[in-house]
Amino acid sequence: MRLKLAKLINYMLLGLLMIALPGCGLFSSSAKRVDASDIHLQLGVRYLGMNKLELARENLLLSLKGNSDNAQAHNALAFLYEKLGQHDKAKDHYETALNLLPNDLSVKNNFGRFLCEHDELEAGMVLLSQASSSPLNDRSWLALTNAGRCQLGMGQKQLAENYFKQALQYNKTYSPALAEMQKIAYQNGDFWASKGYLQRYLGVANHTAETLLFAAQTEQALGNKELAREYKNLLLEKFPLSNEAQKIVGLKGL
Protein backbone atom coordinates (compact mmCIF):
# COMPACT_ATOMS: atom_id res chain seq x y z
CA MET A 1 0.00 0.00 0.00
CA ARG A 2 2.81 2.42 0.86
CA LEU A 3 4.45 1.67 -2.48
CA LYS A 4 1.24 2.44 -4.35
CA LEU A 5 0.84 5.73 -2.44
CA ALA A 6 4.44 6.69 -3.16
CA LYS A 7 3.95 6.01 -6.86
CA LEU A 8 0.73 7.94 -6.89
CA ILE A 9 2.51 10.91 -5.34
CA ASN A 10 5.23 10.77 -7.98
CA TYR A 11 2.71 10.66 -10.84
CA MET A 12 0.71 13.49 -9.34
CA LEU A 13 3.82 15.61 -8.82
CA LEU A 14 4.67 15.16 -12.50
CA GLY A 15 1.37 16.79 -13.31
CA LEU A 16 1.77 19.83 -11.08
CA LEU A 17 2.88 23.02 -12.78
CA MET A 18 6.07 24.20 -11.08
CA ILE A 19 6.57 27.92 -11.49
CA ALA A 20 10.17 29.09 -11.81
CA LEU A 21 11.46 31.47 -9.19
CA PRO A 22 12.34 34.94 -10.47
CA GLY A 23 16.00 35.88 -10.48
CA CYS A 24 16.17 39.49 -9.41
CA GLY A 25 14.76 42.89 -10.18
CA LEU A 26 12.17 45.35 -8.99
CA PHE A 27 8.62 44.15 -8.39
CA SER A 28 5.45 45.82 -7.23
CA SER A 29 4.00 44.84 -3.85
CA SER A 30 1.37 42.80 -5.71
CA ALA A 31 4.03 40.93 -7.67
CA LYS A 32 5.93 40.20 -4.48
CA ARG A 33 2.82 38.64 -2.96
CA VAL A 34 2.38 36.47 -6.03
CA ASP A 35 6.03 35.46 -5.93
CA ALA A 36 5.73 34.51 -2.27
CA SER A 37 2.69 32.41 -3.14
CA ASP A 38 4.72 30.56 -5.76
CA ILE A 39 7.57 29.97 -3.31
CA HIS A 40 5.20 28.45 -0.75
CA LEU A 41 3.62 26.37 -3.51
CA GLN A 42 6.98 24.87 -4.43
CA LEU A 43 7.83 24.22 -0.79
CA GLY A 44 4.43 22.63 -0.25
CA VAL A 45 4.86 20.30 -3.21
CA ARG A 46 8.37 19.34 -2.08
CA TYR A 47 7.12 18.49 1.42
CA LEU A 48 4.24 16.57 -0.12
CA GLY A 49 6.73 14.49 -2.09
CA MET A 50 8.62 13.82 1.14
CA ASN A 51 5.32 12.79 2.83
CA LYS A 52 5.72 15.59 5.37
CA LEU A 53 2.04 16.36 5.18
CA GLU A 54 1.70 18.96 7.93
CA LEU A 55 4.53 21.07 6.53
CA ALA A 56 3.06 20.64 3.05
CA ARG A 57 -0.35 21.80 4.25
CA GLU A 58 1.09 24.82 6.05
CA ASN A 59 2.97 25.99 2.97
CA LEU A 60 0.11 25.39 0.57
CA LEU A 61 -2.26 27.33 2.80
CA LEU A 62 0.30 30.14 2.96
CA SER A 63 0.46 30.05 -0.82
CA LEU A 64 -3.29 30.56 -1.00
CA LYS A 65 -3.15 33.25 1.65
CA GLY A 66 -0.75 35.15 -0.58
CA ASN A 67 -2.78 34.48 -3.72
CA SER A 68 -6.19 32.85 -3.39
CA ASP A 69 -6.30 32.44 -7.17
CA ASN A 70 -3.22 30.22 -7.31
CA ALA A 71 -4.82 27.29 -9.14
CA GLN A 72 -1.83 24.99 -8.73
CA ALA A 73 -1.85 25.52 -4.98
CA HIS A 74 -5.50 24.43 -4.97
CA ASN A 75 -4.53 21.46 -7.15
CA ALA A 76 -1.77 20.39 -4.77
CA LEU A 77 -3.85 20.99 -1.65
CA ALA A 78 -6.64 18.87 -3.11
CA PHE A 79 -4.22 15.98 -3.56
CA LEU A 80 -2.96 16.42 0.00
CA TYR A 81 -6.51 16.24 1.35
CA GLU A 82 -6.97 13.06 -0.68
CA LYS A 83 -4.06 11.52 1.21
CA LEU A 84 -5.61 12.64 4.49
CA GLY A 85 -8.92 11.05 3.56
CA GLN A 86 -10.71 14.41 3.58
CA HIS A 87 -12.49 13.89 0.29
CA ASP A 88 -14.97 16.77 0.56
CA LYS A 89 -12.15 19.27 0.99
CA ALA A 90 -10.21 17.63 -1.83
CA LYS A 91 -13.15 17.95 -4.20
CA ASP A 92 -13.71 21.60 -3.25
CA HIS A 93 -10.10 22.49 -4.05
CA TYR A 94 -10.11 20.55 -7.32
CA GLU A 95 -13.28 22.37 -8.37
CA THR A 96 -11.73 25.72 -7.47
CA ALA A 97 -8.56 24.89 -9.42
CA LEU A 98 -10.61 23.88 -12.47
CA ASN A 99 -12.72 27.04 -12.29
CA LEU A 100 -9.56 29.16 -12.16
CA LEU A 101 -7.83 27.25 -14.96
CA PRO A 102 -10.53 25.46 -16.97
CA ASN A 103 -8.06 24.39 -19.67
CA ASP A 104 -5.26 23.19 -17.39
CA LEU A 105 -4.40 19.60 -18.30
CA SER A 106 -2.83 18.78 -14.93
CA VAL A 107 -5.97 19.83 -13.06
CA LYS A 108 -8.20 17.92 -15.48
CA ASN A 109 -6.12 14.78 -15.07
CA ASN A 110 -5.99 14.95 -11.28
CA PHE A 111 -9.64 15.90 -10.82
CA GLY A 112 -10.80 13.36 -13.39
CA ARG A 113 -8.89 10.59 -11.62
CA PHE A 114 -10.34 11.72 -8.28
CA LEU A 115 -13.91 11.65 -9.59
CA CYS A 116 -13.47 8.18 -11.07
CA GLU A 117 -12.03 6.85 -7.82
CA HIS A 118 -15.09 8.20 -5.98
CA ASP A 119 -17.69 6.69 -8.30
CA GLU A 120 -18.38 9.80 -10.36
CA LEU A 121 -17.26 7.88 -13.40
CA GLU A 122 -18.93 9.74 -16.22
CA ALA A 123 -17.86 13.16 -14.97
CA GLY A 124 -14.35 11.85 -14.42
CA MET A 125 -14.15 10.41 -17.93
CA VAL A 126 -15.13 13.75 -19.46
CA LEU A 127 -12.12 15.43 -17.85
CA LEU A 128 -9.75 12.55 -18.56
CA SER A 129 -10.81 12.37 -22.20
CA GLN A 130 -10.13 16.07 -22.58
CA ALA A 131 -6.75 15.78 -20.89
CA SER A 132 -5.64 12.70 -22.83
CA SER A 133 -6.74 13.92 -26.25
CA SER A 134 -5.23 17.39 -26.08
CA PRO A 135 -2.31 17.86 -28.52
CA LEU A 136 -0.75 20.14 -25.90
CA ASN A 137 -0.41 17.30 -23.39
CA ASP A 138 3.20 16.10 -23.45
CA ARG A 139 2.48 13.47 -20.77
CA SER A 140 -0.74 12.06 -22.18
CA TRP A 141 0.06 8.57 -20.88
CA LEU A 142 -0.89 9.74 -17.38
CA ALA A 143 -4.43 10.71 -18.37
CA LEU A 144 -4.76 7.72 -20.71
CA THR A 145 -3.92 5.30 -17.89
CA ASN A 146 -6.33 7.04 -15.53
CA ALA A 147 -8.99 6.87 -18.25
CA GLY A 148 -8.34 3.16 -18.63
CA ARG A 149 -8.83 2.60 -14.92
CA CYS A 150 -12.01 4.65 -15.05
CA GLN A 151 -13.30 2.46 -17.88
CA LEU A 152 -12.56 -0.61 -15.76
CA GLY A 153 -14.73 0.93 -13.06
CA MET A 154 -17.49 1.27 -15.67
CA GLY A 155 -17.14 -2.40 -16.63
CA GLN A 156 -15.67 -1.57 -20.06
CA LYS A 157 -12.61 -3.82 -20.11
CA GLN A 158 -12.02 -3.61 -23.86
CA LEU A 159 -12.11 0.19 -23.85
CA ALA A 160 -9.82 0.16 -20.82
CA GLU A 161 -7.35 -2.07 -22.63
CA ASN A 162 -7.33 0.34 -25.57
CA TYR A 163 -6.49 3.23 -23.27
CA PHE A 164 -3.65 1.32 -21.62
CA LYS A 165 -2.20 0.35 -24.98
CA GLN A 166 -2.37 3.98 -26.13
CA ALA A 167 -0.57 5.04 -22.96
CA LEU A 168 2.21 2.56 -23.70
CA GLN A 169 2.50 3.86 -27.25
CA TYR A 170 3.42 7.23 -25.80
CA ASN A 171 5.56 5.82 -22.98
CA LYS A 172 6.47 2.14 -23.31
CA THR A 173 8.00 2.06 -19.81
CA TYR A 174 5.08 3.55 -17.88
CA SER A 175 4.76 1.03 -15.06
CA PRO A 176 1.08 1.56 -14.06
CA ALA A 177 -0.07 0.87 -17.62
CA LEU A 178 2.21 -2.18 -17.83
CA ALA A 179 0.80 -3.55 -14.57
CA GLU A 180 -2.75 -3.06 -15.82
CA MET A 181 -1.93 -4.87 -19.06
CA GLN A 182 -0.33 -7.74 -17.13
CA LYS A 183 -3.62 -8.20 -15.31
CA ILE A 184 -5.85 -7.83 -18.39
CA ALA A 185 -3.72 -10.24 -20.44
CA TYR A 186 -4.01 -12.86 -17.68
CA GLN A 187 -7.77 -12.36 -17.46
CA ASN A 188 -8.00 -12.76 -21.24
CA GLY A 189 -6.13 -16.07 -21.02
CA ASP A 190 -3.12 -14.67 -22.88
CA PHE A 191 -0.60 -15.92 -20.34
CA TRP A 192 2.55 -15.37 -22.37
CA ALA A 193 1.55 -11.78 -23.01
CA SER A 194 0.88 -11.34 -19.28
CA LYS A 195 4.35 -12.68 -18.53
CA GLY A 196 5.84 -10.32 -21.09
CA TYR A 197 4.13 -7.29 -19.61
CA LEU A 198 5.43 -8.29 -16.17
CA GLN A 199 8.99 -8.54 -17.47
CA ARG A 200 8.69 -5.05 -18.96
CA TYR A 201 7.20 -3.78 -15.70
CA LEU A 202 10.04 -5.21 -13.61
CA GLY A 203 12.50 -3.38 -15.83
CA VAL A 204 11.26 -0.07 -14.42
CA ALA A 205 9.50 -0.81 -11.11
CA ASN A 206 9.35 -3.18 -8.16
CA HIS A 207 6.76 -5.85 -7.51
CA THR A 208 3.48 -4.97 -5.87
CA ALA A 209 1.18 -7.45 -4.17
CA GLU A 210 -1.01 -7.42 -7.27
CA THR A 211 1.78 -8.06 -9.77
CA LEU A 212 2.97 -10.98 -7.64
CA LEU A 213 -0.52 -12.47 -7.44
CA PHE A 214 -1.00 -12.39 -11.20
CA ALA A 215 2.56 -13.57 -11.78
CA ALA A 216 1.92 -16.64 -9.62
CA GLN A 217 -1.36 -17.37 -11.36
CA THR A 218 0.21 -16.88 -14.77
CA GLU A 219 3.05 -19.31 -14.08
CA GLN A 220 0.60 -21.82 -12.68
CA ALA A 221 -1.46 -21.57 -15.87
CA LEU A 222 1.70 -22.09 -17.95
CA GLY A 223 2.56 -25.19 -15.94
CA ASN A 224 5.57 -23.63 -14.18
CA LYS A 225 4.60 -24.80 -10.70
CA GLU A 226 7.96 -24.15 -9.05
CA LEU A 227 8.10 -20.55 -10.29
CA ALA A 228 4.47 -20.07 -9.30
CA ARG A 229 5.31 -21.15 -5.74
CA GLU A 230 8.28 -18.77 -5.70
CA TYR A 231 5.98 -15.88 -6.57
CA LYS A 232 3.51 -17.03 -3.94
CA ASN A 233 6.19 -17.17 -1.24
CA LEU A 234 7.49 -13.74 -2.26
CA LEU A 235 3.98 -12.32 -2.00
CA LEU A 236 3.49 -13.80 1.45
CA GLU A 237 6.91 -12.56 2.55
CA LYS A 238 6.69 -9.00 1.24
CA PHE A 239 2.97 -8.28 1.61
CA PRO A 240 1.69 -10.65 4.31
CA LEU A 241 -1.25 -8.44 5.32
CA SER A 242 -2.46 -7.65 1.80
CA ASN A 243 -5.73 -8.82 0.31
CA GLU A 244 -3.68 -10.51 -2.41
CA ALA A 245 -1.85 -12.57 0.21
CA GLN A 246 -5.13 -13.75 1.67
CA LYS A 247 -6.43 -14.59 -1.79
CA ILE A 248 -3.38 -16.59 -2.87
CA VAL A 249 -3.53 -18.76 0.24
CA GLY A 250 -6.98 -19.91 -0.82
CA LEU A 251 -6.03 -20.72 -4.42
CA LYS A 252 -5.80 -24.39 -5.27
CA GLY A 253 -2.54 -25.75 -6.58
CA LEU A 254 -0.40 -22.93 -5.22
Image: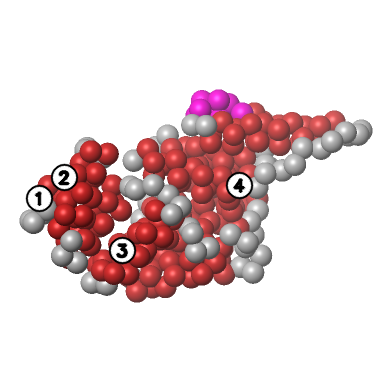
Q: Looking at numbered disc 3 in the image, what kind of residue is underneath it?
A: Lys
Task: Give whichever of discs 4 and 1 has the lower sequence position.
Answer: 4
Q: CA distance from mark 2 to mark 3?
A: 22 Å
The answer to whether mark 2 and mark 1 are in CB contact below 8 A is yes
Q: Residue at x 62, y 63 (%)?
A: 137
Q: Secondary structure at mark 2?
A: helix
Question: Magenta residues, as a range?
Answer: 52-59
Q: Is residue 58 magenta?
A: yes
Q: CA distance from mark 2 to mark 1?
A: 7 Å
Q: Taken as a whole, is the magenta stretch helix, strand or loop?
A: helix
Where residue 212 appears, as percent x and y from the top left, is 27, 51
**Picture layout, residue 139 above or below residue 156:** above
Nearest the viewer among 210 and 237 is 237
Nearest the viewer among 69 and 171 is 171
Look at mark 3 in the image and give the residue it sits on.
195
Q: Looking at numbered disc 1 in the image, what kind of residue is underneath it?
A: Gly
Q: Is residue 17 magenta?
A: no
Q: Would you say residue 123 is visible in this rendering?
A: no
Q: Looking at numbered disc 4 in the image, what kind of residue is underneath it?
A: Leu
Asked if residue 26 lies left or right of residue 148, the reply is: right
Q: Secondary structure at mark 3?
A: helix
Q: Which mark is residue 16?
A: 4
Look at mark 2 in the image and give the residue it sits on.
246
